[in-house]
Image (cartoon, rainbow, N blue to C red):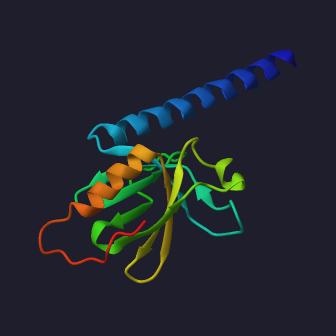
Amino acid sequence: MIEIILDAAGIFLALVVVVLAGFAFRRRFLQRRGGTFDCSVRLRDRGSGKGWVLGIARYSGDSVEWFRVFSFSPRPKRRFSRNDLVVRSRREPMTTEAVGLYAGHVVVECVRSDGTIVELAMAEDALTGFLAWLEAAPPGRTRGPLTL
């Protein structure tokens, strides 16, 4: 009986190691081209502080691709176009939000051209890069003003 329990525990431990190694490999795979930063996205609004999902964002031409941290998919879960986003405001996370976000991140509220609100949470230095990326659009592109 003890042998069965030890075998099951060993198999479980091996599976945990394989899953963690898979997450680490995927993260390295996503970061290989550079231009990545830790970025959480609020996927659903269910009261204050809820709905945040940890992720990794990557610049890809005129869009930012967002990947969930705890996923094996090599494809982005969300894609945000530079031409489609206007930053509306930034704020410190509420106490209830800070528990589900990376430490030191600020919340940025953006509006898409269709009026949809997108909330992103990122570090200050990532926010600086994100704002510069938004402003560095090709000549002739029309967009609303960047406000903070």
Left or right placement of residue 101 versus residue 26 in this view: right
Name above or below for residue 129 compared with residue 33. below
Residue 29 visible within the image: yes
The residue at the far top in this view is 3
* Quarter containing the C terminus: bottom left
Left or right placement of residue 102 versus residue 50 in this view: left
Q: Out of 88 and 66, give the one closest to the viewer.
A: 88
Left or right placement of residue 53 versus residue 73 in this view: right
Q: What residue is rendered at 30% in x and 44% in y?
A: 35
Name above or below for residue 59 compared with residue 50. above
Name above or below for residue 66 compared with residue 114. above
Residue 4 picture quarter: top right
Residue 32 picture quarter: top left
Name above or below for residue 4 compared with residue 122. above
Q: Measured from the top left, where is residue 27 in percent x and y?
A: 42, 38
User: How many numbered markers are drawn?
Assistant: 0
Q: What residue is rendered at 56% in x and 34% in y?
A: 19
The residue at the far right in this view is 1
Q: What residue is rendered at 60% in x and 57% in y?
A: 52
Q: Measured from the top left, where is residue 1 in percent x and y?
A: 87, 19
The residue at the far left in this view is 139
Q: Measured from the top left, where is residue 12 in percent x and y?
A: 69, 29
